[in-house]
Image (cartoon, rainbow, N blue to C red):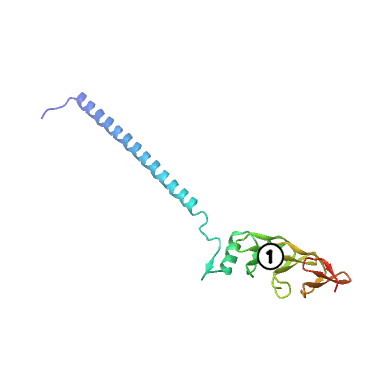
């Protein structure tokens, strides 16, 4: 066996160190490249999820072919920012921001602005397809499109009979039609 001189040993050691350093640099480059690729794939997957599943909750809940009003009201409570959502009645719900009331449809679209002190929607037998509204103690009626068919200026409104209703304004009692126009008794 041949003995190597210290210079040869030193050169072999330097060559081995250089080879190890080159291998380590190649490993780091490969690792960095792989981490960048994995990160890009991760970002693409997350981005794709948000693009294709931005609203994973259905717009309207159906059960047995009919609108599930309970689930719709729960959805509006979670997503709309309203403080309260009353049960749906004939496809509409009374909502509140905590101070004032309005009406929304099943999609959560505001039909009647949230501006009334109170809204009573269970008067179908008295006011078909309308709700009684109150502002500053005065009563009126809104239809299902949110239009004030009878301005809230009356102290009392009686039920509709023969397309008219008796109203009280101060001490005066008289009749109006369903458009709010004064009519003869």
Residue 174 relative to residue 71: left or right:
right
Foreground residue, 27 or 165? 165
* Viewport quadrant of the C terminus: bottom right
Residue 113 relative to residue 2: left or right:
right
* Viewport quadrant of the N terminus: top left
So how many labels did they put on this image?
1
Dot 1 lies on which element? loop
> What residue do we see at 61% from left, 59% from top?
80
Q: Position of residue 110 (x, y in %)?
A: 66, 59
165 versus 104 height, above or below: below
Foreground residue, 96 or 138? 138
- Quick check: can you spot residue 69? yes
Residue 3 relative to residue 101: left or right:
left
* Label 1 environment density (alpha carbons within 10 Å; few <14, some 14–19, many ≥20): some
Q: In which image quadrant can residue 125 be found?
A: bottom right
122 versus 51 height, above or below: below
> What residue do we see at 52% from left, 56% from top?
55
Foreground residue, 61 or 150? 150
Q: Position of residue 145 (x, y in %)?
A: 69, 62
Q: In which image quadrant can residue 4 be found?
A: top left
- Quick check: can you spot residue 83? no
Q: Position of residue 138 (x, y in %)?
A: 80, 66
Residue 176 relative to residue 28: left or right:
right
Residue occupying the far right of the picture: 171
Badge 1 is on which residue?
Answer: 144
Q: In which image quadrant can residue 171 be found?
A: bottom right
Residue occupying the far left of the picture: 1
Foreground residue, 115 or 10? 115
């Amino acid at each position: 066996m041949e003995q190597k001189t210290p210079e040869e040993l030193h050169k072999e050691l330097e060559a081995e160190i250089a080879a190890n350093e080159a291998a380590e640099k190649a490993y780091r480059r490969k690792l960095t490249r792989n981490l960048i690729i994995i990160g890009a794939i991760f970002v693409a997957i997350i981005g794709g999820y948000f693009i294709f599943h931005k609203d994973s909750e259905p717009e309207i809940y159906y059960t047995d072919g009919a609108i599930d009003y309970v689930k719709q009201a729960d959805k509006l409570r979670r997503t709309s920012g309203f403080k309260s959502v009353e049960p749906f009645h004939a496809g509409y719900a009374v909502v509140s921001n905590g101070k004032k009331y309005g009406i929304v449809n099943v999609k959560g679209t505001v039909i009647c602005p949230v501006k009334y002190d109170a809204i009573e929607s269970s008067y179908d037998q008295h006011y078909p397809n309308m709700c009684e509204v109150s502002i500053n103690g005065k009563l009126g009626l809104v239809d299902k499109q949110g239009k004030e068919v009878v301005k809230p200026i009356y102290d009392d409104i009686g039920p509709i009979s023969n397309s008219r209703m008796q109203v009280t304004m101060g001490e005066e009692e008289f009749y109006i039609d369903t458009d709010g126009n004064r009519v003869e008794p």
